[in-house]
Image (spheres, rainbow, N blue to C red):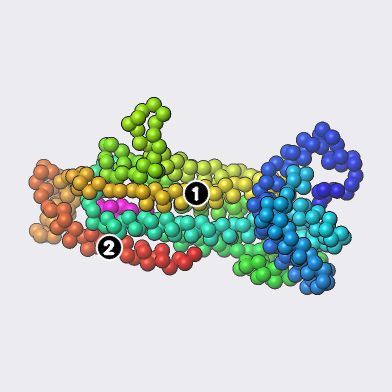
């Protein structure tokens, strides 16, 4: 017997030759591959489950210790690349139990007491999500620091600010980059909500209805580092896919910001602007045009961010019409969230490298700050010096040629004392905000 649900009846699906093989391939899919990633989390949850079984009187202290030693041996085999999860196992849970049974005999069969593959995989997924969320937040903090470094080094370097892709008002590199840094910080700070979703332990809910074994679920949650157990057992399977969807949506908050930053870098590094030069190591050439230096890294950051919408759509579609309880559809919710983490982490790292590889052309940036950018300031000047209403000042300035606007840009920075303006972009505050996150 190689599957947890098999009884040894040769007339069952696995006993059928051609059809059984096709059914197995279809139902297993690539779950056994995904469980290779989840195996250490499954082992961690199994170790804590042994404590609960011992507390419930199902295992003696000696039996629990023997099983724990077996789990440690599997963990070592996995780390050495010698523990295999095969398609015929269906998942990592089966592979673990079969190994324990092969080594420890009937004792190995006791580890599944009081739980189901439903709460096993969900617990492993929640542990994976908690762990990887911290790693992603660390990557985000590191990326923010890189953006702020470049912003602070060019805090007062003037550049045009754009609306509708047209020049609008005077800005600075510090102000431009500070906006992207702040959005990422805001997303980092929003992580508390997602952490509360992944911080509930489903272990012990079994198939979604609990058990009569008498497991201490508060103990299990505490030992695994969760904030609390899932209170109602039926919530466990209802949350599967639902939590993952919100987690992916949260991760897409990072990648959407990165995509917009990459879009600016692509435009500002083009020949039409020339404000930015990208490190050649972050660019590629053309197979036919020797003159090309393509911003491929920035373009792929922009393009790959759209993958997040696909992961979210998959999760939304899978869970949209399900009733309560477990459904095999939920097996398909594991991969999208794993892919989302991989994509978010990759884009945060590549954005950090991209920003580190940028150099700014001060001459082109200053030359681009043409007199028309001072129009709004000319109107404010009339308001402050002559007491003209802003609407009348607006009309007066509108009727004048741009050549009349003669304010000195560097002197103008001294007038920008308001928080968030070109002369005071608030970079120090942003640095303090992100430094509070000691991931």
Q: Are marks 2 and 1 in contact (CB under 8 Å)?
A: no
**Residue 249 in the image, given as x and y percentages of width and height:** 52, 51
Query: Is 172 above or below relative to 292?
Result: below
Front-lying residue, 368 or 247? 368
Left or right for 352, reference 411:
right
Query: Residue 110: which quarter of the image?
Result: bottom right
Left or right for 77, reference 148:
right
Crowd class of label 2 (few under 14; some 14 to 19; many from 20; radius 10 Å): few
Sooner in the amino-acid sequence: mark 2 or mark 1: 1
Q: Which residue is mark 2?
A: 419
**Secondary structure of residue under mark 1:** helix
Crowd class of label 1 (few under 14; some 14 to 19; many from 20; radius 10 Å): some
Residue for point 79% across, 64% down: 67
Front-lying residue, 88 or 133? 88
Residue for point 70% across, 68% down: 220
Which segment did they paint magenta?
171-181
**Residue 244 in the image, given as x and y percentages of width and height:** 59, 52
Front-lying residue, 334 or 356? 356
Front-lying residue, 225 or 211? 225
Q: Which residue is mark 1?
A: 346
Q: Is residue 122 magenta?
A: no
**Residue 61 in the image, given as x and y percentages of width and height:** 80, 73
Q: Is residue 175 magenta?
A: yes
The answer, for residue 316, to whether it is visible in the render is no
The prevailing secondary structure element of the residues shown in magenta is: helix
**Residue 211 in the image, given as x and y percentages of width and height:** 79, 63
The answer, for residue 312, to whether it is visible in the render is yes
Query: Is 283 above or below relative to 172?
Result: above
Residue for point 81% across, 51% down: 4
Give the mark toward the camera: 2 or 1: 1
CA gap, disc 2 to disc 1? 33 Å
Left or right for 387, reference 199:
left
């Amino acid at each position: 017997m190689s599957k947890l649900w098999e009884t040894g009846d040769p007339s069952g699906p696995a006993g059928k030759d051609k059809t059984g093989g096709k059914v197995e391939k279809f139902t297993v899919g690539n779950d056994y591959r995904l469980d290779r990633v989840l195996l250490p989390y499954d082992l961690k949850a199994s170790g804590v489950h042994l404590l609960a079984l011992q507390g419930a009187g199902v295992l003696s202290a000696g039996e629990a210790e023997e099983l724990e030693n077996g789990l440690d041996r599997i963990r070592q085999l996995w780390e050495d690349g010698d523990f295999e999860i095969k398609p015929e196992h269906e998942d990592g849970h089966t592979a673990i139990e079969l190994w324990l049974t092969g080594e420890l005999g009937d004792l190995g069969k006791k580890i599944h007491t009081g739980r189901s593959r439903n709460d096993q995989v969900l617990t492993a997924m929640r542990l994976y999500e908690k762990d990887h969320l911290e790693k992603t937040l660390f990557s985000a903090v590191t990326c923010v620091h890189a953006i702020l470094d470049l912003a602070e080094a060019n805090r007062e370097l003037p550049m045009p600010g754009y609306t509708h892709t047209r020049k609008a008002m005077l800005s600075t590199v510090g102000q431009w980059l500070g906006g992207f840094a702040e959005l990422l910080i805001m997303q980092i700070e929003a992580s508390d909500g997602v952490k509360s979703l992944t911080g509930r332990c489903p272990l012990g809910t079994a198939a979604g209805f609990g058990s009569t074994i008498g497991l201490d679920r508060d103990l299990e949650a505490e030992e695994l580092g969760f904030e609390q157990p899932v209170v109602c057992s039926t919530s466990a399977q209802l949350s599967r896919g639902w939590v993952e969807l919100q987690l992916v949506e949260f991760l897409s908050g990072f990648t959407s910001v990165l995509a917009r930053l990459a879009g600016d870098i692509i435009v500002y590094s083009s020949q039409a602007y020339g404000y930015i030069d990208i490190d050649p190591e972050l660019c590629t050439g053309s197979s036919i045009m020797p003159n090309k230096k393509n911003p491929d890294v920035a373009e792929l950051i922009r393009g790959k961010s759209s993958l997040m919408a696909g992961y979210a759509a998959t999760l939304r579609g899978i869970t949209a019409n399900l009733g309560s309880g477990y459904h095999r559809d939920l097996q398909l919710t594991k991969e999208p969230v794993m892919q989302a983490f991989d994509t978010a982490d990759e884009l945060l790292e590549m954005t950090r490298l991209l920003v580190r590889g940028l150099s700014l052309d001060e001459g082109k940036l200053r030359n681009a700050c043409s007199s028309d950018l001072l129009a709004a300031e000319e109107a404010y000047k009339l308001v402050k010096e002559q007491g003209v209403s802003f609407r009348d000042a607006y009309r007066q300035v509108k009727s004048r040629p741009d050549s009349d606007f003669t304010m000195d840009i560097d002197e103008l920075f001294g007038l920008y004392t308001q928080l968030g303006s070109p002369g005071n972009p608030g970079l120090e505050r942003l640095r303090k905000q992100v430094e509070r996150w000691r991931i």
